[in-house]
Image (tube, coloured by chain):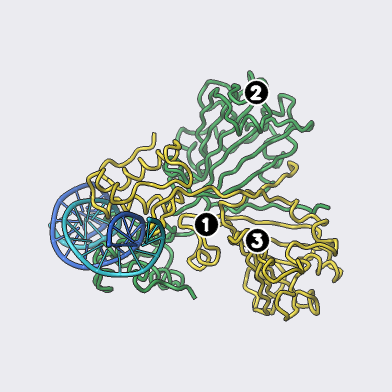
Chain colours: A yellow, B green, C cyan, D blue
Amino acid sequence: MTDVDPRNRAEQIAHELRQKIASGSIPAGGKLPTVRELADRHHVTRATAGRAISLLTSQGVVTPRTGSGVYVRESHPVRRVGPERYARRHWECVTVDVSSDPQGTETVQQDGSQTQAVAYVAADAQVAEALGIEVGATVVERARIVTRKGAPTHSMTSYYRPGDVEGTEIVDPRPGMAGRRGGFHVLTEQGLRPVTITEELHARMPKPDELHELELPAGEPIVEVHRTTRAEDGRAIEFARGIHAASRFVWAYTFEIPD
Amino acid sequence: MTDVDPRNRAEQIAHELRQKIASGSIPAGGKLPTVRELADRHHVTRATAGRAISLLTSQGVVTPRTGSGVYVRESHPVRRVGPERYARRHWECVTVDVSSDPQGTETVQQDGSQTQAVAYVAADAQVAEALGIEVGATVVERARIVTRKGAPTHSMTSYYRPGDVEGTEIVDPRPGMAGRRGGFHVLTEQGLRPVTITEELHARMPKPDELHELELPAGEPIVEVHRTTRAEDGRAIEFARGIHAASRFVWAYTFEIPD
DNA sequence: TAGTGGTCTAGACCACTTC
DNA sequence: AAGTGGTCTAGACCACTAA
């Protein structure tokens, strides 16, 4: 079914390997033959065999480890995310927070954690449109990278109107203070209770800096999420941009068919 | 900000080109210098310059055309899709249908159109779970590729319980008859009015056959959509799998924050 | 027909991992 | 120290495009 150009030796080799992986002949996490072995076996140069590996790498099928070998990529545990993750009970109570464990210094990073950086910046076109303000106006930017079991899963950058979050934990200059109890909680205390959310998703290949930031393997796409949060009166109180490693998430939405 | 390994000449060249593209110095649709020119200018081999192009290609930045040159990929017109596209007024009326233009023979393909293929197949695990039947049970499969202005945008394959669609247009053996008025319309006539939809999205790199089917450029991810449609009583009446070219769609959902 | 991108061989060096 | 993947040069042939 899948036709392979018989003149392209690298594709041929890649195709053969892909089949062996798909059939389970080489299991997930398993090691491929070395490039030298592949080269010998197919009577090609090492460069050509290497190009076959390079193809599979850029398609997200394998991950080469220099000095060790080429391994079949294991499928990440996938997290199914839906509106449920914003449920009030997760942030309206004052008592609990995953990352507010007040114990030893080392335990902070253990399961789920996030680095944070807060700054005043000029609103770009997207932020301005979402928040209904003018381009270049000052907004509060709260950037964070969320880590799970040591591996970064996504980045999320929120924007607020300065007036909405003035004097709150969000703009607290002390490191680690910002949004400790979550941005939604703070907004609620300000009398701006989040009520509706609009999420816009689109997938693309990562830019080089995103690749570094999220420690993405080659051939892994990302999903960019734009979230606009509105209060009861329909006013946008937060706009957020997130970059998610595609293989780690499934996005789920349920809705009624409109008239 | 973006660090580039100074020992990797191909990356260097790619980085420089990427910047020129980002800055608009080389516009969208514009032509890059030839690989030979790049090679001379950077004092590297043609193979190395070619590898730089290959990098940008696999990242979806450029599209090489053999014999002509390397061109900056134009961003496709993006379609914003939300629950609105399922609105009843689009399919509950009997009169209109985009692809049922009864005019000349040539006009059929002009704007939006789709090829269709209907078959009885055995349900795989996903289909079985979604429709609440047993794996291997016979289901009606309706596969289609949707084209817009000559270019395929996505494929969509629906599955129905045979009992739900027996004797309807969906299983009509005459080519072009199946689902002429849309699957939802037919289900409604069968007394199975679609009421709620659950969509699950995830992004990944395309498999080789998907790449051919949708005529995807290298470096273009796809979004796989699983749609489960339910009737009033909550029974699943359709399960569909779609493969969408990532760059052509933005997925939008609005919902209330749950308690 | 001249110029383009794509691919390949042959041989080499490097950085890294593993033992 | 031996083996691994990554990268590069130098030179070649091919298929395709455009004038």
Q: Which residue is mark 2?
A: B165
* Residue drawn at 36 percent across, 51 percent down: A53
Q: Position of residue B166 (x, y in %)?
A: 64, 19
Q: CA distance from mark 1 to mark 3?
A: 14 Å
Q: Which residue is mark 1?
A: A204
Above or below — where is B6 with respect to A205?
below
Q: Which residue is mark 3?
A: A226
Q: Using the rendered image, report if marks 2 and 1 lie on a common chain.
A: no
Amino acid tagged 2: Val
Numbered disc in front, either 2 or 3: 3
For the residue carrying disc 1, how many other residues have a C-alpha within 10 Å: few (<14), some (14-19), or many (20+)?
many
Mark before the other along the chain sequence, 1 or 3: 1
Above or below — where is A205 with respect to A38?
below
For the residues labelled 2 and 3, say whether their Cβ atoms are less than 8 Å apart: no
Amino acid tagged 3: His
Q: Chain of mark 1?
A: A
Q: CA distance from mark 2 to mark 3?
A: 39 Å
User: Which residue is the extreme one toward the top?
Assistant: B167
- The quarter of the displayed image where residue A92 is located: bottom right
